[in-house]
Image: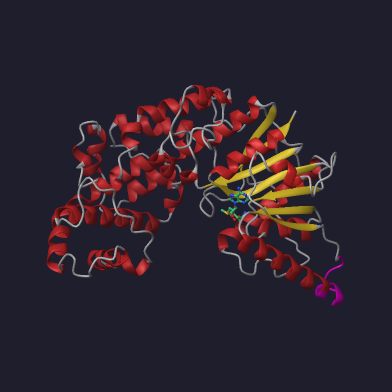
């Protein structure tokens, strides 16, 4: 089935006619709300964000209009559902966001999902997320590669080699799996060897007809724009058609891949990125290479996102469809913002200090505010009685009535997150187009299972 490169810029939202004008509209809306996007939820109480004069009164009205279980906020985040009695100004903003979003739902009739395997134990050791992603992306790469008569695949940032092993062992592609982390590359080698043994065993037992697999090469190298061609051409001969792919090439690696693609003789690029928070941007300490922006237009405008906006680009409000999940997020944010206030008021930190990093806490740490604070204190190496239980309780009671305000603030901010991601993806698409590539963008994973679900696909003209 031909499912890519069908419709010139068909990946754009309806009413959009070119990648560049869409990119500029995204940038304009983000600039309009930059003041808001830059406010941190952790400072919600210490800096009294709710009383910021720039917060529209229409947003504040929601406090009286939503229920205490936040069902409407969750539906707003996950489905853009606006209730009839909500203020017009807010409804219009949601409409604008909706119109500017990329389609994130995979087309139902994609028929490339791999369902039959020579080795029945493929999914051993994979998380449910990987189990979802790997057979879909394998089938996707296989279909595109066959359409373009390519038999050699370079998997950049291959990690444990989940994707590359499946491409080599099930689709018989010659695969070069590149990763700069030795633990990952050792894992990939072990994985492929185990699979080969299992396929041979299954063949002996008559459970599979074929033991044929593609050549699998693991390369433990840090790839960069400068080194890539020489690394790859140790394994790929001149005029040997090959493609470059990645599953969740984090931070700058996706941007680096776009550059490497343009400078190499690879026919196709299939890139799924992640961790926008790790993208580098131009700064005094980093004047040269940047992971964002890539396109001429954004570069000439000196467009800058900054860390807070890049962090927000990683949010996935569509995942709030699970009620419990959504309400949990609100609780976590409320706890963190309240703890910040307590630490300032009780003079554990100064208001001007960077909010201390507590990191991810386990689920049981959220059973009550007190347990949360004690777990956070342990992380920060504070004594467990740094603030007494009575004091924690007093603050909790005092601020609990403002939980809803924080939830509204957090939801509206998160609604803008997919536009930040769209901006990063469109900048990549624009850069590839500026360099004479045809580009397509397709959502291939279920966005709830795997929110970074867009493949940026490029082929040279
Ligand atoms: C998010 S992980 C994805 C791993 C794998 N593709 C998967 O989906 O399971 C990204 C991987 O890219 C590797 N990586 C990052 N930058 C790299 C570079 N410049 N050269 C080679 N590998 C890199 C990391 O070591 C890491 O294993």
Above or below 120: residue 434: above
Q: Name the residue: 39% across, 60% down.
A: 360
Could one spot residue 454 in this view of the protein? no
From the viewer's perspective, tell me whether residue 391 is left or right of residue 359: left
Residue 56: x and y, percent?
25, 32
Question: Is 224 in the magenta?
Answer: no
Residue range highlighted in magenta: 201-210
Which residue occupies 28% across, 33% down? Answer: 87
Residue 90 pos. (x, y %) = 32, 33
Q: Quadrant of residue 184?
A: bottom right
Q: Residue at x 77, y 72 (%)?
A: 198
Image coords of residue 379 (percent x, y): 32, 65
Where's residue 264, x and y in %? Answer: 73, 36
Q: Is any atom of residue 256 visible in this view? A: yes
Q: Residue at x 20, y 50 (%)?
A: 350
Residue 383 position (above or below residue 80): below
| Residue 353 vertical position relative to residue 332 in the rendered view, above or below | above
Q: Is residue 203 magenta?
A: yes
Q: Main secondary structure of the magenta part?
A: loop
């Amino acid at each position: 089935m031909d499912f890519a490169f069908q419709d010139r810029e068909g990946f754009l939202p309806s009413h959009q006619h070119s990648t560049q004008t869409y990119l500029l509209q995204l940038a304009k809306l983000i600039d309009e709300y930059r003041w808001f996007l830059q406010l941190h939820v952790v400072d919600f109480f210490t800096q009294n964000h709710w009383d910021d004069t720039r917060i529209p009164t229409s947003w504040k009205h929601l406090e009286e209009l939503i229920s205490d279980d936040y069902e409407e906020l969750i539906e707003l985040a996950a489905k853009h559902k606006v209730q009839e009695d909500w203020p017009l100004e807010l409804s219009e903003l949601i409409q604008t966001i909706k119109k500017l979003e990329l389609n994130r739902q995979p087309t139902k009739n994609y028929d490339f999902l791999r369902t039959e395997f020579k080795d029945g134990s493929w999914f051993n050791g994979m998380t449910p997320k990987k189990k979802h992603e790997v057979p879909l992306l394998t089938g996707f790469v296989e279909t595109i590669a066959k359409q373009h008569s390519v038999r050699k695949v370079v998997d950049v940032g291959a990690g444990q080699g989940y994707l590359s092993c499946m491409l080599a062992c099930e689709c018989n592609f010659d695969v070069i799996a590149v990763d700069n982390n030795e633990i990952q590359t050792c894992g990939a080698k072990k994985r492929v060897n185990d699979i080969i043994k299992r396929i041979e065993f299954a063949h002996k037992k008559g459970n599979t007809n074929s033991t044929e697999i593609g050549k699998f090469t693991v390369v433990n190298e840090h790839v960069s724009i400068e080194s890539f061609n020489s690394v790859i051409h140790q394994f790929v001969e001149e005029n040997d058609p090959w493609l470059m792919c990645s599953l969740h090439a984090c931070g700058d690696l996706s941007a680096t891949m776009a550059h490497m693609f343009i400078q190499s003789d690879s026919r196709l690029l299939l890139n799924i990125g992640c961790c926008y928070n790790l993208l580098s941007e131009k700064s005094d300490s980093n004047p040269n290479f940047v992971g964002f922006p890539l396109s001429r237009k954004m570069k000439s405008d000196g467009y800058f996102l900054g860390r807070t906006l890049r962090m927000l680009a990683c949010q996935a409000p569509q995942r709030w469809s699970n009620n419990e999940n959504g309400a949990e997020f609100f609780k976590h944010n409320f706890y963190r913002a309240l703890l910040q206030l307590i630490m300032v008021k009780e003079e554990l930190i100064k208001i001007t200090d960077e909010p201390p990093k507590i990191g991810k806490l386990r689920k049981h740490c959220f059973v009550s505010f007190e347990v949360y604070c004690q777990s956070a204190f342990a992380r920060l190496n504070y004594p467990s009685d740094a603030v007494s239980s009575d004091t924690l309780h007093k603050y909790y009671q005092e601020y609990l009535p403002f939980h809803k305000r924080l939830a509204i603030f957090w939801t509206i901010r998160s609604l803008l997150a997919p536009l930040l991601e769209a901006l990063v993806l469109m900048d990549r698409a624009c850069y590839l187009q500026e360099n004479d590539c045809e580009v397509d963008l397709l959502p291939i994973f279920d966005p709830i299972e795997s929110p970074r679900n867009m493949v940026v696909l490029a082929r040279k003209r």
